[in-house]
Amino acid sequence: MMQFTAAQLAPLIGATIEGDAEVSVHAFGKIEEAQRGQLSFLANPKYEEYLYSTKASLVILNNDFVLRQPVAATLLRVNDAYSSFATLLDVYQKMQQSNLTGIQQPSYVASSATLDETVFVGAFAYVGEEVTIGKNSKIYPHCFIGNNVTIGENCVLHPGVKIYHQCQLGNNIIVHAGTIIGSDGFGFAPRADGSLQKVPQIGHVVIEDDVEIGANTTIDRATIGATTIRKGAKLDNLIQIAHNVEVGDSTVIAAQAGISGSTKIGKGVMIGGQAGIVGHIELEDGAKVNAQSGVSKSIGKGKAVTGTPAADYTQSLRSQAIVRQLPELEKRVKELENIIKDLKSNQ
């Protein structure tokens, strides 16, 4: 069990200490449930009441937060409590994983594969011909890595990840359990007799640095060229990315969204859960797609849309408000019609 004092943790997040600098913690906990020896944080004001009753030994708190009551815990004051807590979680996780090296058995690693000596390969994993895996990467059990795949440094492939041949992963990438990268794109050409001929998918997938991909997400290989996930993008669970799609830097896509083929998504785009996006369109930098929206046209830079078919966010909300008022509006129209009818009959 790893233990850290407040004095050891403070430099990692640029914190100032209020209280006992030698108090130690060995685990993390939610502020409303944390126990002695645990570290917690307060970022949402809704949870302020728990700050004064928590049993946590150490709490991360914003610099501008003003205490209304005495606090038993030692405080680590920072500019952004949520971000600082995430930083410590990341450090802790990396320390836990740092002792994982070597190749567990049974597993298969092709003789032509090149693995850095710090790489970990879990039991029942398969590493194909001409694969390259960089420093400190972790390949957990039951992963499949096809021929000619390249994986950079500090990557983590959780159990059951499947990466088809020729795909390329950069550095600092996390892929969660069950995700499939490089499966065939959905391409079929209609024949004269009505049957469908499969179009070979001979491209690949490129995933740039600092990307995280959730569990059971699927990213299809390109027909020709590459399906590309740019630097820093974050994909949730259960997402479908079709062939030749490009996802821009630092874009976030929530669960159950589907992106059709050859659509280009810019930088910093936000796509809500269960959104559906047709193929061959463009979502420019900073676009926002509300959950369950159906996007059938390109979206301009910084524009927000909602609904099916998706339309301007503000206008759509106004339209929804009017729709809810339709029964009352219908009643008022009938009343006006009766008034007009009475006026005409009295002329």
Image (cartoon, rainbow, N blue to C red):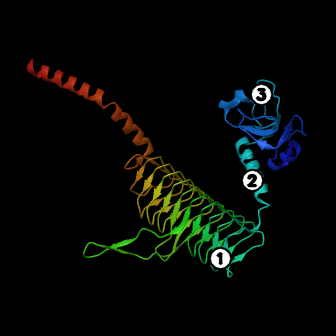
Counting from the top left corner in percent of width and height, residue 304 is at 47, 48
Q: Is residue 347 visible?
A: no
Q: Quadrant of the C terminus?
A: top left
Left or right placement of residue 113 versus residue 225 in this view: right
Residue 296, label in figure: none
Depth check: give the residue in front, 143 or 287.
Answer: 143
Residue tagged 1: 131
Q: Is residue 78 above or below residue 107?
A: above
Counting from the top left corner in percent of width and height, residue 212 is at 62, 58
Q: Hey, what amino acid is under mark 2?
A: Gln
- Which label lies toward us, 2 or 3? 2
Residue tagged 2: 93
Left or right placement of residue 152 versus residue 228 in this view: right
Q: Are marks 2 and 3 in contact (CB under 8 Å)?
A: no
Q: Is residue 208 above or below residue 303?
A: below
Residue tagged 3: 67
> How many numbered marks does the figure carry?
3
Q: Hey, what amino acid is under mark 3?
A: Leu
Q: Are marks 3 and 1 in contact (CB under 8 Å)?
A: no
Q: Secondary structure at mark 3?
A: loop
